[in-house]
Image: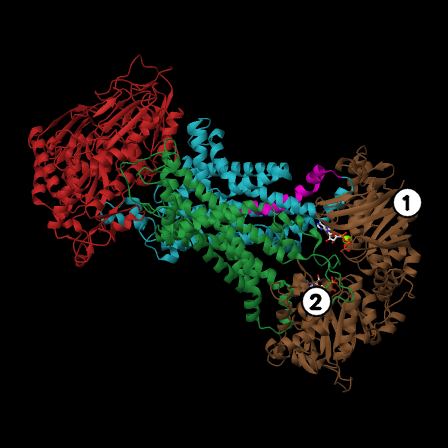
Chain colours: A green, B cyan, C red, D brown
Amino acid sequence: MSGTNGVNSANGANGANEGTRTGSARANDGPDAGTTGTKRPGPPARRSRIRPADLGLWLCIAFLALVLTAVLAPSLLAPGDPIAADSGAVLLAPSADHPLGTDASGRDVYTRIVHGARASLVVGVTATLAALVVGLCIGLIAGARPVDTVIARGTDVLLAFPSLLVALAIVAVFGAGIQQVTLGIAIGMIPLYVRMGRVQAKLVRRSGYMTAARVLGVPAWRAALVHMLPNMAGPLVLMAMIGFGSAVSAAAGLSFLGLGLQPPEPEWGLIIGEGRNRLADAWWVSTFAGLALIATVVAVTVVGRRLQLRWDRGRS
Amino acid sequence: MRDVWVVRALGRWISQGALVMWGAVTLAFLLLKAVPGDPVDTILGTSASVPAETRQALRTDLGLDLPLWQQYLAALVRPLTGDFGVSYRARRPVLDLLASHALPTLWLTLAALALALGLAYLLAAVTRRGVSRRVADVVELVAISSPTFWIALALAQWFAYRLKWLPVTGGNEATRLILPAIALAIPMAGYFAQLLRDGLDRAEREPFAETARARGLSRGGLFARHTLRHSSASLLTVVAFSLGGLLGGTVLVENVFARQGLGRVTLDAIINRDLPVVLAVTMLSALVFVVVNALVDLIAMFVDPRLRTIEGRRRSVREAAETVDPVRTAAA
Amino acid sequence: TSTGADGAGSGEPVDGGTLSFAIASDLEGLLDPHSSQFDATSTALRNVFDSLVAVTPDGEVHPWLASSWTISEDGLEYVFQLRDDVTFHDGEPFDAAAAVANFDHIFAPETASAKIASDLGGDRFAGAEATGDHELTIRLSEPFAPLLSALSTTYAGMYSPAALAGHSQDELRAGGAGITVGSGPFSVADLLVGQELALTKNPDYAWPSDISANPGAAHLDGVTIRFIPEEAGRVGAVQSGETLVATDLTPKALEQIGRDAVTTQLTTAPGLPWSAILNWDRNALHPESGPGVFADVRVRQAFQLGIDLDAAVQAAFGGGLERPWSILSPTTPNAYDPAVEGTWAHDPARAEALLDEAGWTERDAEGYRVKDGQRLHIDWLKWIDGNEDKVALVNFLIEDLKQIGIELVYEETDAYADRWRVDGVNVYDWDITDWSFSSISADGALRSHLSTEGFQNASRVADPEIDRLLDEAVATTDPAEQAAIYAKIQEWNVQNVAIVPLFPLQTAVVMAPSVQGVQFDSFGRPDFQGAWITSA
Amino acid sequence: MVIEIDGLTIRFGRRTVVEDIGFTLEPGRCVALVGESGAGKSLSARAAIGLVPEEATVHATTLRIGDRELRAADDRAWQHVRGRTVALVTQDSQNALDPLRRVGDEIAEPLRIHEPGLTVDERRERVLELMTRVGIPAPGTRALQFPGELSGGLRQRALIASALAAEPSFIIADEPTTALDTITRRLVLDLLAARKREGIGLLVVSHDLGVVAELADEVLVLRDGRVVERGAADDVLRAPAHEETRALLAAVPDGRRITVHDVADAVDDPASGADDTTSDTEPVLVARGLRKGYALPGGGAVDAVADVYLELRRGTTLGVVGESGSGKSTLARLLLAIEEPDAGTVHLGGEPWLGRLGAADVGTATSGRGQGRGRVRAVRERDRHRRRGAIQLVQQDAFGSFDPRWTVRRIVRESPARPDDRRIDELLRLVDLDPALGSRRPWQLSGGQRQRVAIARAIASDPSVLVADEPVSALDATVQRTVLELFVRLRERLGVAIVFISHDLGVVESISDEILVMQDGEVVERGPVDRVVGAPEHEFTRRLLAARSTELGVPSRVCVPGE
Ligand SMILES: Nc1ncnc2c1ncn2[C@@H]1O[C@H](COP(=O)(O)OP(=O)(O)OP(=O)(O)O)[C@@H](O)[C@H]1O
Ligand SMILES: Nc1ncnc2c1ncn2[C@@H]1O[C@H](COP(=O)(O)OP(=O)(O)OP(=O)(O)O)[C@@H](O)[C@H]1O
Ligand SMILES: [Mg+2]
Ligand SMILES: [Mg+2]
């Protein structure tokens, strides 16, 4: 984690030289160390600092709240019907009635984008979660050596496939549709998560507390459950939060190619695809759907990174 | 001593490469066999006017009535003799088909990669601190988050249709390469730039950087002589990983820009269950993966002598895995 | 109807230059006209292959590779006198033997001809024979009037016999220089799969049909046909001057390009307009599931009357298109029946009455009609190409039908093959699909769709009366009689609703003003033999 | 030419970490900054070369180097000074050279910067000369190697060579010896002393008074960023006026054994272990013929532990010393049975604990793996599981040995004894921790506190053997001392036997009854501590001792608590 940590840890009190090799224990552990005479502010003091950069963070959180509303209760944000065509309102430019214009079938683009959030995000979340769970599990078993080698090579094989193509192939096999797309994207992402899972598992396995657990006679299964899983999960979950963006993009990409969700249900990639031939005279269709997608991914990434930073800092 | 690590690396690449190729072919084969529907229908259409005998003859011709394991064996062995079969759909030798499509994609990918790297280095070098850095951070984040096909659409819209600066459609002339390459490069450039900057930050906080500064080296000197190499070393592995994402991205970009290329061939082949083409593309992409990884490995070992020992490799893989966000890498 | 450029062009022809021409479809595997049924094949290869005869848009037949012909009294024997001055691009001479080789190829099973074999009469075609060096005799087993018009198409184009003999069917389909060898004004120079087809001028060309304005070799040095699948791409390519000619454009695209900037040729192709094909017998293989909703003629009629096609076509395609009334395009020679116009205008009240009558009286929570617990539901399975204008059109129809309580679901799936046939048996697991079928002869369009044995008879019409009418029509040589029979069939369709025409199959070709002398065939496909590019 | 600093104050935001410090550094003289960790030593020293972290604000009334006033100097101005007038030798020699560049290039860098006129050949010559000067053998080949290919000592010397390259008048050495093993440490000290004799001014930062005693002329003792005592080195070390100085001095391992008397004042709890009166003759831990090899990457193998025998009795401490890589940790892992040996056995409390049962009787390890499976069965983890609590480990990196998400209480509770809350409080008190700390998480503890938690967890199951692998190496000297005392006290009170591993002979000496000296996996010398220290038989032990005795140039008259 030192990498992401690095981005901001310039303000970490002890800078880069943390670690054990320097021989500079950080606390003054005098003869009276039993009493809590810590004079220097520890990590908690650092955490409470609020910086102006947080404005961006709060904006992102607010936006995500909006997106979440769109997923759970789209009608709150856009009461209209996202599917019903209207031959009287074809390709209208943004106006008071249609803040983001209408598409070729006379449907309100804003309504479609709001209602499209669910499909786009559900695919992203489900696929990412699935990949995450598989990655965690495989990472966890990938301890015993022969198994590990097999898994490592297997992951290599899978990584040789561009993940979008994997998703494509899955959709080709099982047909287009929301479950298939989710499955395809999940499978496409799995090797990455397995890889991360393995690395995390290795890190944890090699850690002092796993040695300690062994010495303490903690059974292997228990150590896996109480030490490995939670300690692996943290970084993985946060990476998944960041990786979620690519899942959403991939889903949109598939829909865009006509292989994802099927019209007339709204979905962001689909909306972008529907507007692609009308960019010259009806730019609003593709453009706004794309912006919604980008903004969501940015927001999730920002929040994910911030949490990751916190997690890292919490442990050093 | 130097020879030893090169030889060892060679052995590793060959054995792992063979394994990856075999696995890739097997997977593709299984997947395609799982696809419902008859490739013969793809070839002849579903019209009832085609007599059943014709269909059967074609099936025999394509080897589709052999037992599955024989088909699998053929899929594995025939490529070794340079025989990749005939595309079901295009009715052309697959090798021909790939030969004419691989090059445009190669150019596109290379151009995009070069562009992304160039942009990333520029950004990372110029926006080290201050306001510019904060702006760059945001811009890069947005770039990373933008779907390739959307960027492609936007670029086509503005630079080809509206401003008419660049041609709309695909081809191999340099001018026709620019827009697709940019579309592919933008998210990658953002990602690379962030990685680079991260690497620079990290390197600057290393003790050797302090030592170097203590010798009187300027910031620029530090960048040029020390930190640049360090951040590049970690970027390299990521570049290798990004290749997969890049190939995936070409599907979309080639689609938007009507470019001839592997991406579209693959898309068509998958949709049409054109097994020979899918297998060949799979092999090709696995081969590219293997070769590029080997190359990157080699370059990395030249850049970073620590990688020449096994322990060093282990450590660096671990570090890369810790620092790099591989999810993003693949989707870049 | 065709508007815009007239064939001749203005000013003196200029020699030289290469013209680029943008089309939508890739030609991968479609370069053998004898096996392909796709428009793109014909669009791309019209100038590569010559045909025995040529047909004007109004159906007049003119000599081309055949300088004259006679038809026997009983209409069963056609004797063609062939030109003796024709050579193929590879130097092979054109003679009766070469023509026979072509017909043999068309009907060879491995060719798996998807179109032309049937257009030539299918089983009626008894054989072609060289009755002299340059005399070709075609025999039919039954009279088949549309033979000549079928012979005029690119799909019946004449290959060099050497090319046919020297290449496998796979190679012919894939095509390329040295494989796709005809005798036309241009020869295939290079094929970049997925990208372009390069044609170069055949300098020796001296045998155009007498419809052609240019008696000799082409003025252009070459034609580059570029495949640009996205409409926006073709529009952009024309706007930016990357290509001088483009086709496959929707009315909205034309608006976008602007009529002043280019010359526009609009042709409504003869044959079946873009239509909804109603499946009368869904679940034919699973009778236990009951017949589909369209088994009941009242439901079909309600469907026809419930859609507001005028508004939908207008909204989906812009002002350029007139809605169709008949299953034959007005441009189909000797066949169109103007009497059907206005006979099935939007009438929701009548539609509702018909549905009530058919027993669909209850309504469910969402307002759809229900009978025996089943919702009145129609699956519309998308056929090949769902560009967004067509999708929009369907979306409007969905709304119209919702008003009268019918639920229409449009499925854009790539797995349509599964819904068409399983184990080689046609299944047709859908209520509606959509396509068009361009054909210079009415028989070509109607027989395939409405005869009991028709290969495109997706409605599963099995009406002896119609079969009889179709046979009668091809048996007669009197155009007026023919037109009367076809009128009956068109009226029959309005009553029985096998097919609902949705919008005219209009081919739009746009050309930069510098392009002159392009001629168009009945389908609106450009012929570049007489074309040139002005330097201005 | 002097460095003159006065009124130096450094702040991070509102936090002042260095306040009003001043000193003058002259050629040929050495000023030392000492103080506990975090006292501000490094920051003060860095201020003299203008390399305080960017986020810090620095004020000084005087900041002069030679006749240059550098208070308001920008980076460019500092660049002229750095390397040419003042050079810096950082503590972390492992990482202070760019691992991607050749050693020669790194040494040459100051020349490149400050003497751009030199030709390539001249520069190379200078580099070789420098390398010879700092005692790097075969400089020609070394110059072409990468830092990673050099041993720690060579790296440290290369670093010094690089600092000397542009012939600076002053060298700042920040903890120059901390992470080094004793022998290398000696070399570096000698090297610095020689530079001082050559007339270079030294500013040494260390919490190690041994180093200070040897090099410094003047000492500044810092605490919390303030000078609490300053004066001539001899005076300060001999007669420390401030208690901080005294604490620092007390912590210096001086080879004197820490005895119960040292810690007696803390013992008043009659709790556990004291009931033991049975004879000590029966050893609790016996290892026979232990052998463990690792395959080397690229073929070959290394014997990390080769044929080791040892016996350990109740209440005694066995010290294990040796250079880095000599196999100490591997031995520990074998004793704990978390690694399977290639050969040999371990008996714990008289019962088989590790290795093949049959082979135990033979006594010597004959061969590797596999044969005679039916008869000779290795002890399995299942057999050991119940007895795990009897042998426990204290690791060097206490922080790393805790699950970072857990509270102290939960960490201690993981012990196989499953202590309840009352017992945990008791244990915490036993290791001198306030039970209130039980709800904290590892990162909220100081290094010493963490080590105590680790010890508390280890003794919770009432082990008969405690294996401590470098338990104090990561702690600074003051804390080190208190932890050592804790070990002694626990040993006396609980009767636990301790295997104490360290690379630092001084530390081992102060706590052990017997010493085992390891080199390359083999035990080269063993015996009672007095005998080994007093009359070393093996050459290697002598070297370790030599390095130790000169380094600890601190007069042992200084006051030690409890004496
Ligand atoms: N970059 C920084 N940001 C914030 N605080 C810092 C930074 N660097 C050092 N400090 C703080 O300044 C104080 C003095 O640090 P300094 O490194 O000088 O200590 P030191 O005496 O060298 O300790 P050690 O023996 O551990 O090296 C410490 O409290 C430290 O936490
Ligand atoms: N898992 C392993 N795989 C391969 N070699 C190993 C492994 N563990 C230790 N070694 C090697 O065994 C030797 C002894 O290592 P060990 O860790 O026991 O040394 P040490 O005396 O504890 O050193 P240090 O003081 O640095 O901790 C070293 O050469 C080391 O490289
Ligand atoms: Mg320090
Ligand atoms: Mg060790």
Q: Name which residue type carries label 1.
A: Glu
- Callout 2 environment at 10 Å: few (<14), some (14 to 19), or many (20+)? many
Q: Is residue D390 above or below residue A171?
A: below
Q: Secondary structure at mark 2?
A: loop
Residue A89 versus residue B21 in the image, above or below: above
Q: Is mark 2 within 8 Å of ligand 4?
A: no
Name the residue: 53% across, 45% down. Answer: B242
Distance of label 2 from label 1 (alpha carbons): 43 Å
Asked if residue C252 shows in the view, the reply is yes
Query: Could you tell me how many numbered marks the image carries?
Result: 2
Q: Earlier in the sequence, mark 2 or mark 1?
A: 1
Left or right: residue D219 versus residue C413 is right
The C terminus of chain C lies in quadrant: top left
Q: Secondary structure at mark 1?
A: loop
Would residue B215 appear left or right of A92 to someone viewing this image?
Answer: right
Residue lying at the far bottom of the rendered structure: D278
Q: Which residue is disc 1 drawn over?
A: D26
User: Residue D166: percent from the left, percent from the top?
Assistant: 83, 40
Answer with the quadrant where ligand 2 appears in the image: bottom right
- Give the x, y percent position of residue D520: 76, 65
The reply to whether residue B292 is in sight is no
Is residue C327 found inside the magenta-colored segment of the image?
no
Q: Which residues are magenta?
A: B217-241
- Asked if C188 appears above or below C104 in the picture, the reply is above
Mark 2 vs mark 1, foreground winner is 1
Residue under pointer 2: D395
Residue A105 position in % (x across, y down) = 30, 39
Chain letter for mark 2: D
Q: Quadrant of residue D425?
A: bottom right
Q: Residue at x 48, y 60 (%)?
A: A133
